[in-house]
Image: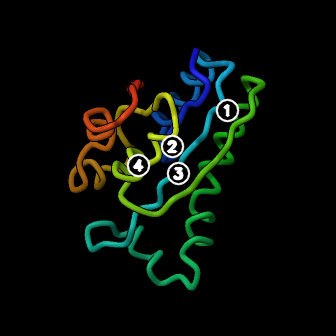
Amino acid sequence: MLSRVLVPMDGSTLSERALEYALENHPDASVTVLSVVGEPSVMMGEAMSIAFEDDIEVAAEERAAPVFERAREISAEYDAEIDTAVTVGRPARAIITRAEDYETVVIGSHSSDMIDRLFVGNVAETVFKRSPVPVTVVR
């Protein structure tokens, strides 16, 4: 039985399915929802705006708030509590780094953001290939 599960969420339907899967299949585990706010770069339009914020950590928390709100709604449907964490960086790298503290990662098969898929690459595929712990990819 797993005791610590990491579920990266980006607000997409598939990331919501990943959380539902984790809650259904690991009901006794401590589940942490991770939101990764992309680090500023010319390739990531929305993430670039965070570079102009006075406090990047506060801005990242604000951007993650809707994701966490939805995650809490989903967990309430399962009568479960979740932890939340936000970080700024490249999504795949940030998830892989955090994964070391968990027994498994449950991730949606792809982001809803076409730009992420075209320019950044498939985050789920990268996490699957490089994670130090087992990964479940949910479709």
Q: Quadrant of residue 33?
A: top right
**In the rendered structure, which amino acid carries the disc numbered 2?**
Met
Provide the residue designation for mark 2.
Answer: 9
| Mark 3 neighbour density, 10 Å: few (under 14) some (14–19) many (20 or more) | many
Front residue of this view, candidates 125 and 17: 125
- Residue 54: x percent and y percent? 57, 85
- Mark nearer the viewer, 2 or 4: 4
Colour logic: rainbow
- Mark nearer the viewer, 4 or 1: 4
Provide the residue designation for mark 1.
Answer: 74
Q: Are marks 2 and 1 in contact (CB under 8 Å)?
A: no
Q: Earlier in the sequence, mark 2 or mark 1?
A: 2
Q: Earlier in the sequence, mark 3 or mark 1?
A: 3
- Residue 122: x percent and y percent? 27, 43
Q: What element carries label 4?
A: helix
| Mark 2 neighbour density, 10 Å: few (under 14) some (14–19) many (20 or more) | many
User: Left or right: 10 with respect to 83?
Assistant: left
Provide the residue designation for mark 4.
Answer: 97
Q: Are marks 3 and 2 in contact (CB under 8 Å)?
A: yes
Provide the residue designation for mark 3.
Answer: 35
Q: In which quarter of the image is the C terminus?
A: top left
User: Left or right: 61 with respect to 36?
Assistant: right
